[in-house]
Image: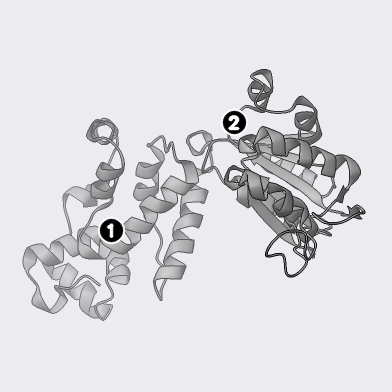
């Protein structure tokens, strides 16, 4: 079992605060959801807040809530996100971007296990599990005076580093899972990525991590039926030099250079009633390659690659 996955499983069974660290797009919120779903609090709410989007003038009511009549327009009691997470998990994403003055409010909530809504005279107890995430080095932020040291030690009880996609040895599993999810949502029938396509994708660095990979695969799933190849999509996503360097050292399958005889292609299309996914699979070629051959031979009955 990979270290970070093992730590996530261990953390899920406890009530300890967890600090998820990693680059943007590595799946920190997915990890937080995993912790919640596998914890004793799984039946409770999972409440997420992007700390970088907190407006200073609304921070107090957002975190702790407000009582009816406490300010203009407060016609009813307003529940803060901390109260909303009572009995469940509070996920604070990008905690490193939380404004410094708001950090003190969060620290007090964590110390007292209670909130004081605007307009209230007594604290109200809350019981939640805290999971935070950041793509910043919080120790550096503390040293530079951007993050409270006392809050950092509150949050850093159980740190877990989620590795970037380029350092994951399970890239094939991740790519296949993302692709299967996309095709299940987009098409009536699922069809897998070819092994060579996954290997080709794995050669890129993916600075945007899983989020960037998902974007590319979404485009590929939609455009491959319009004769757009995976290489074309990747050439738009990365620099031409990057693509050329990878292609020079990548062993493309023979079928990429030489497609089957056109007679066999027609036969496969007829046998599969025009279903290009099944026809391509039976021919052991990519769907993009099949569409290219259809267009090349101007076979009118199958000219539309949909």
> Which numbered disc flags the more N-terminal residue, 1 or 2?
2
Q: Residue furthest bottom?
A: 273
Q: Residue at x 61, y 37 (%)?
A: 97
Q: Secondary structure at mark 2?
A: loop
Q: Residue at x 68, y 47 (%)?
A: 59
- What residue did someone put label 1 on? 286
Q: Residue at x 78, y 53 (%)?
A: 64
Q: Nearer the viewer, residue 149 or 302?
A: 149
Q: Is residue 178 visible?
A: yes
Q: Measured from the top left, where is residue 54 in percent x and y?
A: 62, 46
Would residue 95 appear left or right of 178 to someone viewing this image? right
Q: Measured from the top left, where is residue 263 in percent x and y?
A: 12, 70
Quadrant location, the N terminus: top right
Residue at mark 1 to residue at mark 2: CA–CA distance: 41 Å
Q: Marks 1 and 2: which is nearer the front?
A: 2
Q: Measured from the top left, where is residue 255 in percent x and y?
A: 23, 52
- What residue did someone put label 2 on? 136
Q: Measured from the top left, where is residue 15 in percent x and y?
A: 85, 47
């Amino acid at each position: 079992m990979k270290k970070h996955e093992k730590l996530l499983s261990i953390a899920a069974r406890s009530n300890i605060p967890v600090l998820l660290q990693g680059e943007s797009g590595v799946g920190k919120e997915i990890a937080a959801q995993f912790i919640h779903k596998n914890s004793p609090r799984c039946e409770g709410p999972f409440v997420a807040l992007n700390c970088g989007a907190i407006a200073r003038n609304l921070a107090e009511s957002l975190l702790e809530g407000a009582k009816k009549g406490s300010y203009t327009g407060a016609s009813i009691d307003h529940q803060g996100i901390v109260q909303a997470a009572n009995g469940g998990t509070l996920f604070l994403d990008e905690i490193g971007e939380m404004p410094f003055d708001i950090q003190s409010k969060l620290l007090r909530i964590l110390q007292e296990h209670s909130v004081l809504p605007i307009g209230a005279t007594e604290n109200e107890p809350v019981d939640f599990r805290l999971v935070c995430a950041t793509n910043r080095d919080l120790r550096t932020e503390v040293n530079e005076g951007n993050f409270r040291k006392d809050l950092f030690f509150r949050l850093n009880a159980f740190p877990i580093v989620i590795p970037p996609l380029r350092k994951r040895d399970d890239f094939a599993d991740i790519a296949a899972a993302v692709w299967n999810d996309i095709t299940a949502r987009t098409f009536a029938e699922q069809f897998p990525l070819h092994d060579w396509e996954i290997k080709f994708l794995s050669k890129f660095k993916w600075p945007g991590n899983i989020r960037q990979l998902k974007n590319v695969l979404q485009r590929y799933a939609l455009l491959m039926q319009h004769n757009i190849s995976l290489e074309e999509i990747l050439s738009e996503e990365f620099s031409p030099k990057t693509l050329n360097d990878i292609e020079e050292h990548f062993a493309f399958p023979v079928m990429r250079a030489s497609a089957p005889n056109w007679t066999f292609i027609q036969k496969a299309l007829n046998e599969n009633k025009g279903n290009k996914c099944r026809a391509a699979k039976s021919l052991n070629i990519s769907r993009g390659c099949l569409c290219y051959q259809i267009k090349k031979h101007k076979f009118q009955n199958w000219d539309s690659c949909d």
